Amino acid sequence: MPTSPPPSKTSGGFTLVEMLVTLVIMALLAGLATLSAGGNAQRAARDEMSRIREMLLYARDEATMQGDELGLLLEEDAYSVLRFDPESELWSEIPEKPLDRHELPKGMSLSLSLPEAPVRRSSGGNDDELVPEVLLSSSGEISEFTLELRLSPGDELIAGLESDGSGTLRDL
């Protein structure tokens, strides 16, 4: 009658090498997760600047086709395109997409640099009057400006856009 081999004396646990390989894999995955979380905020900021660029190009084309004077109004946490009404000599918001008011994602901040102060086209003294900082003329020109987008004030530049006054936009 054949005899069976004696039972093995191994404990059935993990070896030191197996545990070290597992720890290395876990550390790599944690590092990748951390990097991708930081990259998402930067990617969102670049996407937002791309959205502003496309909106300005669309507004420039609309101003040219309609013969209107348009402008970009920047607020602390939002931006929108305004239309100038020559009869009332006032700027008003455009409620239609894609030129309507758009809120910035939380934590992002825009800073605008202009070579000169915005032109006021109204003689009224109303402090609540909307006045755009960047003008888009019916001739297709966009006034000179530099726009920078940061994740928070004082942070490094994530994305930027500038115009030389001719109607072309250039990424920073």
Image (cartoon, grey):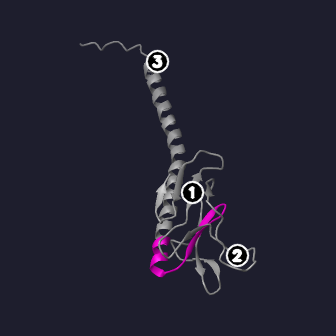
Which numbered dot is residue 16? 3
- Image spot of residue 170 (x, y percent): 47, 57
Give the residues in magenta. 59-80
The first of marks 3 and 1 along the sequence is: 3
Tell me the kind of residue under disc 1: Thr
Asked if residue 161 lies left or right of residue 4, the reply is right
Residue at 49% of width from left, 62% of height from top?
53
Asked if residue 88 lies left or right of residue 128, the reply is left
- Mark 2 residue element: loop
Question: Residue 72's quadrant in the figure?
Answer: bottom right
- Mark 3 residue element: helix
Which numbered dot is residue 129? 2
- Image spot of residue 132 (x, y percent): 62, 70
Closest to the observer: 100 or 71? 71
Asked if residue 140 lies left or right of residue 8, the reply is right
How far is disc 3 from disc 1 in space, using C-alphas?
A: 58 Å
Q: Nearer the viewer, mark 2 or mark 1?
A: 1
Closest to the observer: 25 or 38? 38
Residue 93 forms part of the magenta stretch:
no
Residue 70 forms part of the magenta stretch:
yes
Tell me the kind of residue under disc 2: Glu
Residue at 51% of width from left, 60% of height from top?
164
How far is disc 3 from disc 2 in space, using C-alphas?
A: 72 Å
> Could one spot residue 15 in this view of the protein?
no
Closest to the observer: 129 or 77? 129
As drawn, the residue found furthest toward the left would be 1
Residue at 61% of width from left, 58% of height from top?
112
The first of marks 3 and 2 along the sequence is: 3
Residue wearing tag 1: 146
